[in-house]
Amino acid sequence: MAPQPFTGAFTQQEQLDDAAIAAAVRVMKTGRLHRYNTVAGETSEVALLEAEFAAWQGVPYCLACASGGYAMHVALLAAGLRPGEPVLTNAFTLSPVPGAIVNAGGKPLLVECTRDLVIDLEDLERKAVSSGARFLLLSHMRGHIVDMDRIVAIADKHGFEVIEDCAHTMGAQWGGRKSGNFGLAACFSTQTYKHMNSGEGGLLTSDDPEFMARAIILSGSYMLYERHGAAPEAEYFEQVRLETPNCSGRMDNLRAAILRPQLAGLTANIARWNDRYYTVEEVLQRSGLFHLPERPAAESPVGSSIQFLIEGISEADARQFVSDAKALGVELKWFGDANPVAFTSNHHSWRFLDDQHLPQTDEVLSGVFDMRIPLTFSLEDCAHIAEIVVHCGRLLALKGAA
Ligand SMILES: *Cc1c(COP(=O)(O)O)cnc(C)c1O
């Protein structure tokens, strides 16, 4: 018998709490929304957010900016990317990642994805050697963290810098160390569907003072870089400030004001996401119908979404599966779809890139389904949703057996 349809909204995040709303109202009442518009003795909300996020992340430097994609763009420029240079990145990621590389003047070189949805380390080494790339923009897509000890070793061996895309791993860890603290820099997003919500927004972190000085000037600090909350000493700006263009992309005080209380609640929310994630995962796992990507013991993820594979599924069956689930109120994304839909697209629709030959990724993505797990869903909702997914999986399996 079919389960009852689910009626919740997969794109509905929680409302902002009263502290965030009060902070936003306070800022609006001052009229000082620009980060450098402060009165004597005042530290701007953006500078406070930078200091608090740096402390939370456990790094000396943080820059708040306009978006996660902008943070990646600025990171590549501050790292010294030259026009036309190759940048290694994951074939399985979201379109703003290759977009940021192109925006910074680089050429994305996509690396294959494994069936556990992380970057393929053999293909990475192969392409590092063949391209001589000096940068890897490593996307922890959908929160799956590759073996970071091996990444660090491979980067050392082949002499490339790692910039981490932590849009889905804010608060996650590998081996007890925060995701984002393994390379030159890390980029976070505070866009509505990520782990903190300011509509749009980005955070860039690093422990490299020269890198961060360049990033701050790039972000549009003018000569006001001393009004930052987690910036290197003034001496690092002496040359940099004259040699670095202003690529305006600052964060404003209103966004920072609503992010600060969210940062204070982030640890609690990570636990809430994981309760929901493991509730869904357990039901899917038990059904025996799906491959759930391995979550290694060293990984502490943030389960804000879930992915599972039906390996070898045909295109017609994948469409049927998504539509059966939808009929019961469950929104699944299928990464194998040749047509980009909403936020989901795969490398075949990134035609601004040179042709990429990615047979393994194509094979993997043809069976990948993806579902958001917003905190507005209760644990009962999660169990209900998982039952629906399993029900639709059984329909497919029965059809195959018939
Ligand atoms: C959302 C996202 C980004 C970009 O963040 P924006 O703040 O939307 O620019 C980058 N990488 C991944 C994997 C994302 O999901």
Image (cartoon, helix red, strand yellow):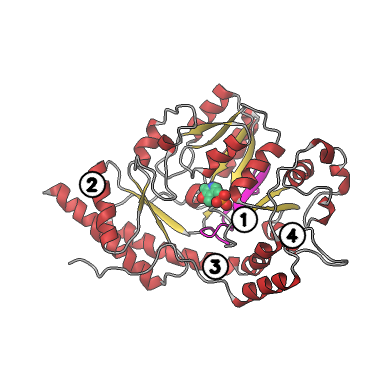
Q: CA distance from mark 3 to mark 1?
A: 19 Å
Q: Amino acid at mark 4?
A: His
User: Label 2 sits on what residue type?
Assistant: Asp
Query: Does mark 2's beta carbon lie closer than 8 Å to ligand 1?
Result: no
Which is more N-terminal, label 4 or label 1? 4
Determine which of the numbered discs, if any, sits on residue 201 in the image: 1
Q: Is mark 1 within 8 Å of ligand 1?
A: yes
Under mark 3, the amino acid is: Asn
Disc 3 to disc 4, how far (Cα)?
Answer: 29 Å
Left or right: where does residue 56 sit relative to residue 324?
Answer: right
In the rendering, which numbered label is found on residue 34?
4
Binning the other alpha carbons within 10 Å of mark 4 as few (below 14), some (14 to 19) or many (20 upward) gives some
Report the front residue among 240 and 162: 240
Looking at the image, residue 324 sits to the left or right of residue 83; the answer is left
Q: Residue lying furthest front in this view?
A: 31
Residue 245 is left or right of residue 124, and the answer is right
Q: Secondary structure at mark 3?
A: helix
Q: CA distance from mark 2 to mark 1?
A: 38 Å
Residues under labels 1 and 4: Cα distance? 14 Å
Asked if disc 2 and disc 3 are in contact, CB closer than 8 Å, the reply is no
- The reply to whether residue 166 is in sight is no
In the displayed structure, 7 sits above or below 90; it is below
* Disc 2, SS: helix
Q: Mark 2 and mark 4 in contact? Answer it, CB < 8 Å.
A: no
Segment tinted magenta in the rendering: 171-196
Give the residue drawn at x 24%, y 60%.
Answer: 391
Residue on which the image places disc 2: 317
Front disc: 3 or 4: 4
Within-10-Å neighbours for mark 2: few <14, some 14–19, many 20+? some
